[in-house]
Image: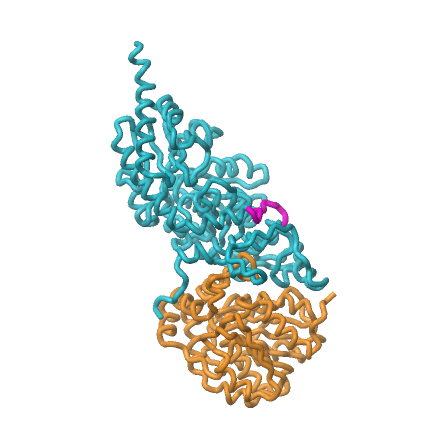
């Protein structure tokens, strides 16, 4: 009685959102490789187009395979609904375009994925939407940056690439007392390590391409709505949700759909008009990944911890940045919000700076040098020369990204092989930087 | 739209169309901790198919200010006030759970002034467990999860929602969480205290439909049977795959059952 018997998280990674196919009995989620769906009759078609009844019309707006992924993500994050998108970046844009128009303003953490910073600082301003970036470790900076036209507070939980851990509850308090929703990029934590809705977030987006999919084979994103934000508290701020929308005969989304008003508007308008659709085939791959998410994340985190400890004790390493280490400034915050472990990304600097870092990158054999994270395979990257190269030196410094920073995405390989590969690459880096001195 | 009763505003969703007084008009009454949006997968379609829709936010719920009404008799009084305030004549009442008890009690008093009655997820008595009553008053989030757990059949807990991408269970939880503790407690206490369902059923004088969920643990169909038996000509539809939250669990079936029933009052044809 005191603990209602909801299905547990691990069970939901396998089952949520899917009933066995009623026609064939197929247990796996079928790939509905179709663009469109038969109407029963004229009235059925008219009703679907007017949102009078739920149902599939055209796969840009919804698809049965994709719908399973969407409902599974909603279930795992404990939100009222989700929309799967072509990428995580498409999910960010979908949320912004649903919440605001020209003149809108976003307050965001400055420790974001470089692509998000590009979107906020360089692309959205062309459409009249601006952003102010603030220190994620200072909730008071979020509050100070809020303006009358602000419509969203945005941050990653585990900052990219410096691994700052956001005090979600403090920033959620800031957002809510200013009448704003808080949106969290949960890519690095996945719903297995932290469910941001439990700490006050109102919207979550994921790049499913990363740990949720988990195998580096498919792009995808998700936007999930907690259904907690009260759009009617200040209805004039949210006309897309509280005012009639002519494109659907005057529907008022927050009225018609209650807690699901935001996510319904995002689909009805955003997926119809912006077209960042996820394919059924991609959704199928992502569902396969989700089925093993708890198992993989436990291994990712265990390996990351061992790699961090190894690097921290290595003679060729200047510093290690991993929230699981007590030396990390946000270690306590990580223990609070990420009790199962603070993910599998870490950063470190090789003694010898940029040249040593480059030598290390060139020397790894098991680790792969590429621009992705969250693969089953272990990955390394030098952000200053790749993902964050558009940022100025000042912007890089403000985001805490040094020239020598190596980002590591720890995979699922045998830990002995990973440590051996790191050891040999670090020793080569030492030799590479020591050689010129010997020549002098 | 807003309806004014004794100077107080009552919000009602109209399903996206203005009311035509020449058509039958269905007043939809939500259950404990709900609001008009629980009917969203039925009302928009019905409003576009020949019947007016007034899906109410009962006092203290959704966009209607409180205080809540704390008895089924009081809710029935309120529904009669709504009917009188609108001035509409060709009226039917559609209720779910607590709203069904209120509609039943109002129907008993209205006699042949009411054209029809549809009762979803209803039983002759709705005792509420003391732990749920306590949680409603002190911990609405816990109460919301209790209600969602019992209220949904097994299939809904797994998913596969016809409303694609939407979690029926989580939407129910979030809606209940929005309800103020004193309002949720008043709702559940009203259900628990009401003993007049059978007596009211015996007075109903209009065509009546029951829509019940075979997996309903809160108001199982067998508990509705005495009410069905008491109302002459009552029709019952039992939805095999649904629990108590049938409007979200079996949205197509509930909509079709309601529309089938509304056809006898002249609804059913798509509006121009």
Which contiguous range is marked in magenta?
A272-281
B195 inside magenta stretch: no
Residue A436 in percent (x, y) is at: 33, 13
The number of numbered discs placed on residues in the rendered structure image is 0
* Left or right: A250 in relation to A426: right
Residue A201 in percent (x, y) is at: 43, 52
* Left or right: A406 in relation to B46: left
Residue A130 in percent (x, y) is at: 52, 40
B158 and B113: which is toward the camera: B158
A343 up-or-down from A247: above or below = above
* Left or right: A254 in relation to A162: right
B271 and A18: which is toward the camera: A18
| Colour orange maps to chain | B
A217 and A50: which is toward the camera: A217
Q: Quadrant of residue B42?
A: bottom right
A279 inside magenta stretch: yes
Residue B41 visible somewhere in the drawing: yes
Q: Quadrant of residue B236?
A: bottom right
Residue A14 in percent (x, y) is at: 45, 55
- Dividing the image into 4 quarters, which one contains the N terminus of chain A? bottom left
B213 and A147: which is toward the camera: B213
* Left or right: B148 in relation to A90: left
A328 up-or-down from B59: above or below = above
Picture residue at 46% right of the left edge, 80% below the top? B71
Seen as rendered, the residue at the extreme top is: A440
Seen as rendered, the residue at the extreme right is: B272
Question: Which tint was used for chain A?
Answer: cyan
- Dividing the image into 4 quarters, which one contains the C terminus of chain A? top left
Residue B6 visible somewhere in the drawing: no
């Amino acid at each position: 009685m005191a603990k209602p018997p909801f299905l547990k998280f691990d069970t939901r990674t396998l089952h949520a959102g899917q009933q066995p196919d009623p026609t064939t009995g197929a247990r796996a989620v079928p790939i509905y490789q179709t663009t469109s769906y038969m109407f029963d009759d004229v009235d059925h078609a008219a009703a679907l187009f007017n949102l009078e009844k739920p149902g599939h019309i055209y796969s840009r707006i919804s698809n049965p395979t994709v719908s399973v992924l969407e409902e599974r993500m909603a279930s795992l994050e404990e939100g009222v609904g989700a929309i799967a998108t072509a990428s995580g970046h498409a999910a960010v844009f979908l949320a912004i375009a649903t919440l605001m128009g020209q003149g809108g303003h976003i307050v965001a953490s400055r420790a974001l994925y470089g692509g998000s910073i590009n979107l906020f600082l360089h692309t959205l301003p062309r459409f009249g939407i601006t952003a102010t970036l603030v220190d994620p470790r200072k909730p008071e900076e979020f509050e100070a940056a809020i303006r009358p036209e602000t419509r969203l507070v945005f941050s990653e939980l585990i900052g990219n690439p410096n691994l700052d851990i956001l005090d979600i509850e403090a920033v959620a308090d800031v957002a809510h007392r200013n009448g704003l929703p808080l949106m969290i990029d949960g890519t690095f934590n996945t719903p297995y390590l932290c469910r941001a809705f439990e700490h006050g977030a109102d919207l979550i987006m994921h790049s499913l391409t990363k740990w949720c999919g988990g195998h580096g084979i498919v792009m995808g994103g998700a936007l999930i709505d907690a259904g907690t934000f009260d759009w009617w508290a200040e209805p004039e701020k949210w006309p897309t949700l509280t005012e009639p929308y002519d494109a659907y005969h005057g529907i008022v989304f927050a009225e018609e759909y209650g807690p699901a008003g935001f996510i319904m508007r995002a689909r009805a308008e955003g997926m119809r008009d912006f077209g960042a659709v996820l394919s059924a085939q991609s959704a199928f791959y992502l569902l396969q990944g989700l089925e093993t998410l708890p198992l993989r994340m436990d291994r990712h985190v265990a390996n990351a911890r061992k790699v961090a400890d190894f690097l921290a004790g290595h003679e060729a390493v200047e510093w290690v940045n991993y929230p699981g280490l007590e030396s990390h400034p946000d270690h306590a915050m990580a223990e609070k919000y990420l009790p199962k472990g603070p993910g599998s990304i870490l950063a470190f600097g090789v003694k010898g700076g940029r040249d040593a870092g480059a030598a290390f990158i060139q020397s790894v054999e098991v680790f792969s040098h590429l621009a992705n994270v969250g693969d089953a395979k272990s990955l390394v990257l030098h952000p200053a020369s790749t993902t964050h190269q558009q940022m100025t030196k000042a912007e890089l410094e403000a985001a805490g990204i040094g020239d020598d920073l190596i980002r590591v995405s720890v995979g699922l390989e045998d830990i002995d092989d990973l440590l051996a590969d790191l050891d040999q690459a670090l020793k080569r880096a030492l030799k590479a930087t020591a050689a010129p001195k010997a020549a002098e | 739209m807003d309806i004014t009763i004794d100077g107080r505003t009552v919000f009602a969703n109209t399903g996206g169309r203005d009311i035509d007084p020449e058509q039958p008009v269905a007043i939809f009454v939500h259950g404990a901790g709900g609001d008009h949006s629980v009917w969203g997968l039925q009302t928009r379609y019905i409003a576009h198919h020949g019947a007016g829709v007034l899906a109410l936010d009962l006092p203290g719920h959704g966009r209607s200010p409180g205080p809540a009404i704390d008895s089924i008799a009081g809710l029935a009084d309120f529904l009669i006030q709504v009917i009188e305030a609108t001035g509409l004549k060709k009226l039917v009442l559609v209720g779910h759970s607590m709203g069904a008890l209120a509609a039943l009690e109002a129907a008993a008093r209205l006699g042949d002034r009411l054209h029809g009655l549809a009762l979803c997820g209803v039983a002759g008595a709705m005792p509420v467990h003391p732990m749920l009553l306590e949680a409603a008053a002190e911990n609405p989030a816990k109460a919301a999860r209790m209600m969602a757990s019992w209220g949904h059949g097994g299939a809904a807990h797994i998913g596969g929602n016809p409303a694609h991408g939407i979690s029926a269970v989580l939407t129910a939880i979030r809606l209940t969480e929005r309800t103020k503790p004193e309002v949720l407690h008043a709702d559940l206490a009203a259900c628990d205290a009401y003993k007049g369902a059978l007596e009211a059923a015996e007075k109903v004088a209009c065509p009546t439909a029951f829509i019940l969920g075979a997996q309903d643990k809160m108001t199982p169909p067998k508990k509705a049977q005495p009410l069905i038996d008491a109302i002459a000509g009552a029709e019952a539809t039992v939805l095999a795959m649904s629990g108590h939250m049938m409007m979200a669990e079996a949205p197509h079936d509930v909509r079709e059952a309601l529309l089938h029933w509304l056809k006898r009052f002249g609804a059913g044809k798509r509006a121009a």
